[in-house]
């Protein structure tokens, strides 16, 4: 599995489900990753969790992101789904309180020995392993974690260049990514505040990272992957029209449940003029038909 010179769709809870991943793939993402999946639930073969693990051949190469702190369950989970994925990504960066309360996500950055123990075991499971981290929990220790990843021959490490307590506020410090790249030999994937092709180029130049992962910049905006590719080739790119944004949303509409149809509608209509009232109405509807009727109002 090659993690160099790739544009990667970040795993995002309730966002990177199959319909959206397929869109991003079509617009030029080299690699896509599932939303964050509970290793504990997967180890129990929870029905809803198994549904979230469904993939399409059109998505390849694709990774699944797991979170958890129970080594036994992480191993069980990987064994259950590894045949369907090209690599496993272990989440060591989620800042959400509900994940931290489980001792998982970015909380594990407090426990480098635990991370070492998990990685030493799951790297024996005959599938590439990557990890996604933050700069640290309460203190900056991304370099320590990077050295542990390197020791365990991890396939790649993604650094979201913020501390846990920042969540998504302030600016990502790309110099952390640069420092990590300069000090370890495994591929480093930069993540944080890439919202445009210009941001992509700037991150690559500033950090010399091997690949770039796009998260919030892709919300309602799968076009960013094509824009980056166009910008690399021609130094130019185009912005989607209102019609293109809505029609692209409608491509995945039938494959979404009500909750996710609402969420994606909010993201895809961002930036459209005089949209505030319509977006408020979308969040209050009780059926998908009502969403489509409201969306159609944008054209008439």
Image: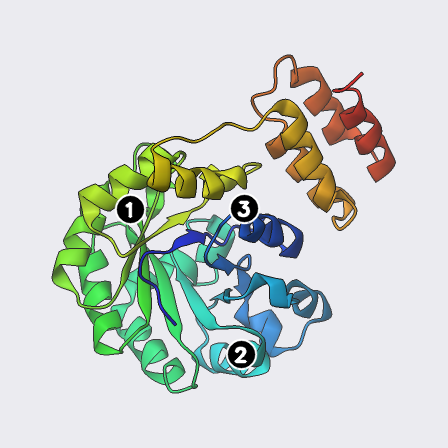
Location of residue 204 (image quadrant): top left
User: Which residue is under mark 3?
Assistant: 27
Does residue 16 appear anywhere in the picture? no
Residue 197 % position (x, y): 37, 36
Discs 1, 2 touching: Cβ within 8 Å: no
Q: Quick one: label 1 or label 2, which is nearer the N terminus?
A: 2
User: Which residue is under mark 1?
Assistant: 161
- Observer-nearest residue: 215 or 90? 215
Give the SS element for disc 3.
Answer: loop
Discs 1, 3 touching: Cβ within 8 Å: no
Residue 173 bears which disc, if any?
A: none
Residue drawn where x is 43% and y is 86% of the image: 125
Residue drawn where x is 81% and y is 32% of the image: 292
- As displayed, is residue 292 above or below residue 206? above
Q: Quadrant of the N terminus?
A: bottom left
Using the numbered discs, state the Cα–Cα distance from disc 1 to disc 2 in whole angstroms: 28 Å
Residue 82 bears which disc, if any?
A: 2
Residue drawn where x is 32% and y is 35% of the image: 199
Q: Which class describes the residues within 10 Å of circle 2: few (<14), some (14-19), or many (20+)? A: some
- Which mark is nearer the camera, 1 or 2? 2
- As displayed, is residue 98 above or below residue 89? above
In the image: residue 232, left or right of residue 34: left
Name, please, the residue furthest toward the front: 234
Q: Quick one: label 3 or label 2, which is nearer the N terminus?
A: 3
């Amino acid at each position: 599995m090659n993690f160099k010179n790739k544009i990667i769709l970040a795993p995002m809870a309730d966002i990177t489900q199959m319909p959206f991943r397929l869109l991003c793939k079509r617009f030029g993402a080299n690699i896509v990753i599932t939303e964050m999946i509970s290793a504990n639930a997967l180890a129990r073969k929870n029905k809803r969790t198994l549904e979230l693990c469904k993939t399409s051949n059109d998505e390849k190469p694709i990774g699944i992101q797991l979170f958890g702190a129970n080594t036994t369950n992480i191993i069980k989970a990987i064994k259950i789904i590894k045949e369907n994925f090209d690599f496993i990504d272990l989440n060591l960066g989620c800042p959400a309180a509900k994940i931290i309360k489980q001792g998982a996500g970015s909380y594990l950055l407090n426990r480098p020995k635990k991370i070492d123990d998990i990685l030493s075991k799951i790297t024996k499971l005959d599938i590439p392993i990557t990890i996604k981290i933050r700069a640290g929990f309460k203190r900056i220790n991304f370099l320590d974690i990077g050295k542990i990843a390197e020791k365990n021959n991890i396939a790649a490490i993604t650094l979201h260049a913020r501390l846990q307590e920042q969540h998504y506020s302030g600016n990502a410090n790309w110099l952390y990514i640069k420092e990590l790249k300069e000090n370890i030999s495994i591929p480093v994937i930069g993540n944080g505040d890439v919202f445009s092709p210009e941001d992509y180029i700037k991150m690559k130049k500033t950090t010399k990272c091997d690949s770039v992962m796009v998260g919030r910049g892709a919300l309602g905006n799968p076009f960013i992957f094509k824009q980056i590719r166009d910008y690399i080739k021609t130094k130019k790119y185009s912005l989607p029209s209102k019609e293109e944004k809505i029609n692209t949303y409608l491509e995945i509409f039938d494959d979404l449940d009500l909750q996710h149809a609402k969420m994606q509608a909010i993201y895809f209509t961002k930036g459209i003029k005089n949209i505030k009232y319509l977006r408020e109405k979308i969040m209050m509807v009780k059926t998908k038909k009502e969403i489509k009727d409201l969306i159609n109002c944008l054209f008439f």
